[in-house]
Every structure is written in C-alpha cells, then in structure tokens.
Amino acid sequence: MRFLNFNWLSRAYNLGLSFREVAALIVLSLIATVTEVFGIGMFLPIFQFIRLEGDLDALVSNSSLWQYAINTFSYFRIETSLVALLILSFSFFIGRQVFTYFRLIYSTVVRQRIMQKIRKRVFSSYIDANTSYHDSMPVGNLVNTITTEVNHAVIGLMAPVELIVYIIMLIGYISVLFILSWEMTLISAIILILASRIPNIWIKKSAQTGRKLVNANTIMSEFLVGRLRSPRLVRLAGTEMAEKNEFHKLTQEQRKHSVFGSILQARTEVSMEPIVIGLSMIFLYFAYTAMNLQIEIIGLYLVVALRLLPIVKNIISQWQIVQRLTGSIEVIEMRLKEMKNSFEKNTGSKKLNALKQSIKLTNVSYRYPNGSDNTLKNITIEIKSNEMNAIVGPSGGGKSTLIDLLPRLRLPTEGAIQIDNLDIEGYTLKSLRENISYVPQSPQIFNGTVSDHVLYGKVGATNEELQDATRLAGAYDFINQLPHGFDTVLGDDAIRLSGGQRQRLDLARALVGKKPILILDEPTSNLDAESENIFKNTMHEIHKKTNTTIIVIAHRLASIYDSDQIIVLNNGVVESTGVHSELIKQNGWYSKAWKMQES
C-alpha cells in the first residue's frame, strides 16, 4: 500500500498532523495490541490447565514454559490456579481497553485540532489573498471547502494512522497463529493476500466516486449560497418551481455518488468475511484429520482467526476510506496553494500617518486578469487633502475599479499612484488602510447589534466616540427609536431598517475611526429623494466639521454638484475634471447627464 511512505507523512504534516502525534497513536495501539495478544494467548495455558486438571508436574512436562509461569506466580506469592490464570488473562484485556480508550480520545483530540487548524488556515488564507482571487472564487465553493471538505480531508488524513493500528493488530494475531501452527498460518496468509486483491477494483472506483462527490458538494454549496440570499428575487421572478427542480437535481447527484460510495464500501466488507471463515473451516478440518493438534490449540487458533475477521475488514475499509477521501484532501491542498500564490504582497515599509498633501495618479492603467483590454487607460488626476472629490461617469466606465486602486485592493497594470509624493507601494498595507474608511453602495451589515456594526470601524471605541459618529452620520435619532437602542439586534443586512437608515448606520461605522480619507461608492443610488437629500446634507456636515478627504462615486449628479473637484470617467478615460460650473459649460458627458437628470 503506497500510503505507507514519506509522501503521506509529508502531506499529513503540511496539513497539521505532526510526527509526534502519529508516533503517540501508534505506540498506544501497539501497547493495546500486545496486551490483547497476551490476554488471548492466556487461553492456551488455561485450556491446558483444565485438560490436565491442574497437575503442575504434567503441565511442566508438557511445556517448559510452565516452569517459568509457576516460578513467576511463586515470586509474587500467588498460587498457580485456574482463578489466577483467569484473573491474569482478564487483566490483560482490561489493560487493552484502557490503552484503547486513551488512543480513541487522543485520536479525537488530534482530529478536531487539525480540523480547527485547517479551517482557520483556509479562512485566514482567503482573507489574505488578493482581490483578483476573491473575484474568481465563488463563496459557495469556499463554504463547502471549510464546512464539508475539511472534515472529510481530516478523516482521510487520519485513516492511514488507523490503518497502521490495524496492521499492528494483524501482525500480533498472525504471530500468535504462527506460534500455534506455522504451516497453516503460512498457507492462510498467502491465500489471504491473494484474496485481498478481489476488492481492489472497488477501492479504485472509490477514489473516482470521492472526487465526484466533492464536485457535487461544491456545486450544491454554490447554489445554496446564491439562492438563500435572494428568496425575494426567486419568488418575484416566478422561478420557484425551476429552483426546486434544480435543487432536487443537485441533491440527486449528491445522493447518487454517496450511495455508490457506500455500495463499494459494502462490497469490500462482505467479500472478506467468507474468505476468513472459509480458511478457519479448512484449518479445523486439517487440524482434526491430519495434524493431530491438541484441542486447546485448535480452539485458540479458531478464536484468533475469527478475531482477525474484523481486523482484516477494517484494514481494507480504511484503505478504501483513504482512496474515497483523497478528493477532499486534494481540494484542500489546491485551495491553500491557490491562496498562497494569490497572497496579497505587502512591499511597503513606511508608515502612513495622515494625508497631508494629495493623492496623485500618473498615467495609471489597469487590466483585469484574463481581460482583453484595459479597464482604466492612462489616468492622471490629483485628489487634494481635505477636499470633497466626486468621480462620475456612465456605468461600466471604471469608477469602482479606480477606487479599488487607492487602498491597493488592486495594483495598477501601468503607471504610478503617490500619496504625499511617495509611491503607494512604499507604505505598509496596514498603515495605508488604517487611513481609509469605505462605504459601499449596498451596506454590508453582519448579524449583531447596532453597536457591533458601528464598532466594526474601530475596535475599542469609547461610548462617546460611538455616539459622536452616529450623530455626525445622522443616525443617532433613529437608533434611539429602535426597541433596544444601540443594543438592538439587526439581523443579516439589517433588513428591518430602511435603505437610508442602513446607509447612515454604515456611514457611522466608517466615521467612528476618524480616518483622514473617506471613500463612498454610489451611497445614494438606492435611496429615495428625501433620504438622498439627508445624506447629501450629512456629507456637507462631515466636510465642514472634519479634516476628511472625501471621495464619492456618484450616479446622481445633484448630490455632488458642489464638490471641490468633479472627475468625469468615461470608458476608462478621464474625460474632464473641474467644478460644476466649469463642466456644465462643456459639451461633454457631465453636461448632457446634468440636463437629463434635471428634466
């Protein structure tokens, strides 16, 4: 079996299973096996003692080992009797159970620790991966990897250890059989090895089935994450039946591969039992007719042979588990490798403390991975500190992509970005992002209280800072009208709040950290006219009361027309820059859009 090599050990070690833990499990199983073998081996002297009615002289003449046994009992001042032999045999079995108990508990502890470690590693690696990887990795895929495949992978990693345990037990029992009758044991071992080849084709199919099940689980998770987030869309689109049918199809695929995997497992298990029992019957026949073995040896041989049955079945079963769960291990390794290759590089060493002068983009272009053309083309602009800057333009013009470049979520394909005349890559990622607050178009509010969400912008903020931020964001009054005020549980996405309330609450989260740069991505696109006007006034309050550099991506021009600078981005190119009064006089996109929105 190829798992017994350094490749498996290296693979297991890379995923968190240490050599020390493997050794400890093997030692515990070895001790348990030795004690069990001695316990079963004690049946031979017990049977002999019964057959010779406790005649010690006859026992010694029958086997010289009896003299050592009698001397050992005498040394401990114990009478050599049937009761003593039975108690000794029982003690060995108790010892075996004790060490088996510790092995099972330790195995569970190790397995759960590795699961936790891999899950933490996958999640951390995903968080540390670059934005391009996040763009390409479906959330459902990652959820399936963390919740399902990690569990299967760890079972697959531990299966070889269990396999080694059973092999140790097999060796122990075969040793006993060899002592009892080496001729029959040798013949039986050869037959058993040949017979073990029978389920080989099913074991190979298990590996293929395991990979298909991993794929089916991944597709199902991707489907669920998407649909469970959009029940309204499903109902309003009238596609309930289609989605139910698709779900049935996906569950059917999962069921098919799971059932087939169980069928292969069952075939493997049932195929070995007749072989072991058949070998026991053959031994019984030859022992009685040709070998003239003593009845106690025959009986003990059959006991050990039948004890071998579950061990042989478990060896093949564990090997089949290794094959079946290889797909899960491969997925974990592949995800970790992908994330490692996509790790967000922190090349800077200088700490950014504040924006003192400006942010400059010089001849900046950006092309998405596998993109056929640049999304941004030769962008040259300057965003001065403590000013309100608006970026406008038609949909698909590259506004959000441009915003992603500022906190280095994406790196320019060409050109340079400077903050206070130092290339942005010269700053550490942590210090750069500690100076930037971001408010997305659709607020991302996790399940928790109002305070929890606002404090997401600054861990450990004081109650005074919390209230100041909500007042500045225009959220303080409606928060106090909630059933439990700041302790009100919002639920996922705070669906019980209006669009304007969610937006102001998220703005408070961005403001509580008092960061010098505030980026807002189309903050009013989902608001009604009244909420939009409130939000606009809030922006002016922030601009007037703080030294914050505000960058707003806007769709509705009325909300940003009085900005200090308006940048028109059209088809990835800066079409024009200036203030409202200047741009309105030009016959460009801004002028036409303003007239259309006014009418």
Image (spheres, rainbow, N blue to C red):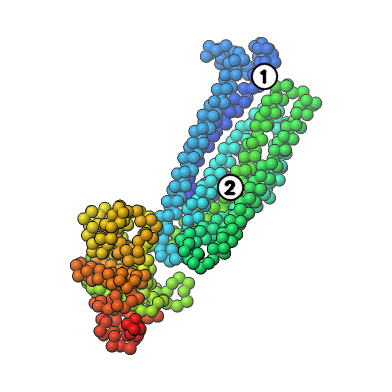
Q: Is residue 349 left or right of residue 293?
A: left
The residue that appears at 60% across and 17% down in the rendered structure is 85
Asked which quadrant contains residue 464, the reply is: bottom left
The answer to whether residue 408 is left or right of residue 358 is right
Judging by the rendered image, the residue that carries numbered circle 2 is 322
Report the amino acid beneath label 2.
Val
Number of numbered discs visible in the structure rendering: 2
- 539 in relation to 316, above or below: below
| Front position in the image: 204 or 219 | 219
Q: In the rendering, at what x and y percent does residue 146 appear?
A: 47, 53
Of the residues shown, which amino acid type is indicated by label 1?
Answer: Phe
Quadrant assignment, res 354? bottom left
Residue that badge 1 annotates: 47
**Residue 231: where, in percent of width, then height?**
48, 62
* Front position in the image: 455 or 174: 455
Nearest the eye: 409 or 411: 409
Question: Regarding mark 1 in the picture, which secondary structure is present there?
Answer: helix
